[in-house]
Amino acid sequence: MKTKVLVVESSPELCSIWCRHLERLGLDVTCANNQDDAVRQVREGAFDVIVLDLVLEGGGAFAVADYASYRLPEARVVFVTNTTFFSDGSIFQHIPNACAFVQSETPPDDLAAIVEHYAAN
């Protein structure tokens, strides 16, 4: 069975780039561009890994991660950000299903490798 990944990113262009790199690894990828769409996707599907922009436009990444923790407790969340919030690692104390915290500038191939790693575990 294919690993299922949800990518939640406000920028459709960046979301598309990340999705293409993940699909090249043979992962089954779904994109969401906002909190409402992400919550709907989590409610309707089962995901192994969620790539989640910490700063979603018009919504809360914590709400998405919280809901995923409730609906899909085994799903791992890879947070991506372009800010210094939680650079001290405290996000792992706040979000129980967080497994990684990387910068938005992380090369897409590296992000895909991180997702693949956590999907395998």
Image: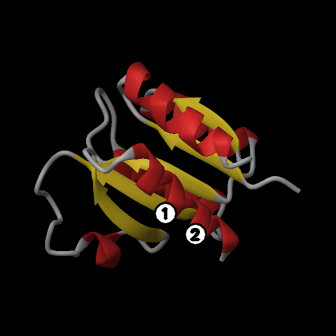
As measured in the structure, the alpha-carbon distance from the residue carrying label 1 to the one carrying label 2 is: 6 Å
In what element is the residue under mark 2?
helix
Are discs 1 and 2 less than 8 Å apart at CB? Answer: yes
In what element is the residue under mark 1?
helix
Residue 64 visible? The answer is: no
Residue 1 visible? The answer is: yes
Amino acid, disc 2: Tyr
Give the labeled residue for mark 1: 114
Horizontal and vertical percent position of residue 59: 33, 34
Image point (52%, 60%), residue name: 113
State left or right for residue 56 relative to residue 86.
right
Horizontal and vertical percent position of residue 63: 41, 49
Q: Nearer the viewer, residue 44 or 2?
A: 2
Image point (28%, 28%), residue name: 57
In the rendered image, the quadrant that contains the C terminus is bottom right
Q: Among all residues in the image, which is located at the extreme top?
A: 12
Amino acid, disc 1: Ile
Against 92, residue 63 (above or below) is above
Q: Nearer the viewer, residue 23 or 119?
A: 23
Horizontal and vertical percent position of residue 43: 68, 43
| Residue 116 found in image quarter | bottom right
Against 120, residue 114 (above or below) is above
| Residue 101 found in image quarter | bottom left
Against 42, residue 56 (above or below) is above
Give the labeled residue for mark 2: 118
State left or right for residue 84 relative to residue 81.
left
